[in-house]
Image (tube, grey):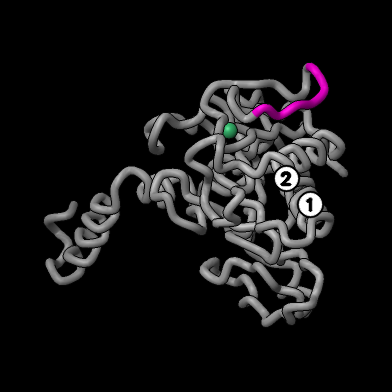
Amino acid sequence: MLALVPVLVAAPAVAAVAVTLARGPFQGSETVSGAPPAGVVAPRAAATGSTDASGADSRAPGVAQRAARPASAPPSTPAVAYRRSTALGLPHAGRLRDGVQLPAEGAYFFTWDPIFKTRRNRLWRRYATDFTVRRLLRVMREHVAAHPGAPRVGVGDLSRTRGGPFGPEYGSIGHVSHQNGLDADVYYPRRDRRERPPRLPAQVNRRLAQALVDRFVRAGAEKVFVGLNVRLKGPRGVVEPLAHHDNHLHVRFPNRRRG
Ligand SMILES: [Zn+2]
């Protein structure tokens, strides 16, 4: 079949395949399973004409560009293309239908790519249910508002665009859970206020970290996993120490439709 196609027509198609393959496993999964389905990116701010687009992901097509925000203005809510999501299966064996993308950053939070170790986590690692995104944003907004001078909250991986396995094939040790849009990694605030994960427990601002844990519990988190060496507390059965959580907490929200 290919042999019948004129060379000039076939060449670009071959080149496109080569480019896709050359992008590697992480970018490749964005191409294959990470691309938002049609109609996902229809930001409310753009649709309604709202000017409150602070924190919008300017790289995402169709998302309003970030508007200038006076330094004195309270933290604003970034534009998010909310839609009703469904968490299928379990956090360690599930999928995500119609997930919602967390913006790359906002006035009160930033996202962090745990593999490339850069700000603005890749978009296909930032999907969750609408409930999870709403609660996560609310907790971070209220935390920063309640603690003047606190650094923005850092968010790591949520789920992939359509959920599913998020293991080592996506970098580092990967995640056992994070499969159906209910889980989020949130980095502990650093004492030096730098916007990057702490490397050591001694770099963690424990007062602010505990405040975040408390606020997630009050917001109805089902689980908050915390490090073995950061000495954070909470209700038994909800806040649980777990290995590999000395630089971030892992919050799991309930599988709920509304909130
Ligand atoms: Zn996690």
Q: Is residue 230 above or below residue 62?
A: above
Q: Is residue 232 left or right of residue 177?
A: right
Residue sitting at 17 percent across and 62 percent down? 5
State left or right for residue 44 relative to residue 174: right
- Residue at x 12% of width, y 56% of height: 3
Residue 23 or 39: which is nearer the viewer? 23
Badge 2 marks a residue whose secondary structure is helix
Q: Is residue 121 above or below residue 172?
A: below
| Residue where numbered disc 1 is placed | 143
Q: Position of residue 27 (x, y in %)?
A: 37, 51
Horizontal arrangement in the rendering, residue 220 relative to residue 176 (left or right): right
* Quadrant of the image occupied by residue 63: bottom right
> In terms of image quarters, where does ligand 1 lie?
top right
Q: Amino acid at mark 1?
A: His
Q: Amino acid at mark 2?
A: Leu
The magenta stretch spans residue 109: no
Residue at mark 2: 208
Q: Nearer the viewer, residue 40 or 157?
A: 157
What's the distance in space between the residues labelled 2 and 1, CA to CA? 9 Å
The residue that appears at 66% across and 57% down in the rendered structure is 151
Note whether 147 is above or below 96 in the view shown.
below
Residues tagged 2 and 1 counted as in contact (Cβ below 8 A)? yes
Furthest-top residue in view?
A: 237
Across and down, in percent, residue 195 comes to 55, 56
- Crowd class of label 2 (few under 14; some 14 to 19; many from 20; radius 10 Å): some
Write the residue at 62% across / 30% down: 230
Q: Quadrant of the C terminus?
A: top right
Q: Which residues are magenta?
A: 231-236
Numbered disc in front, either 2 or 1: 2
Indicate the quadrant where residue 90 lies: top right
Q: Nearer the viewer, residue 256 or 140?
A: 140
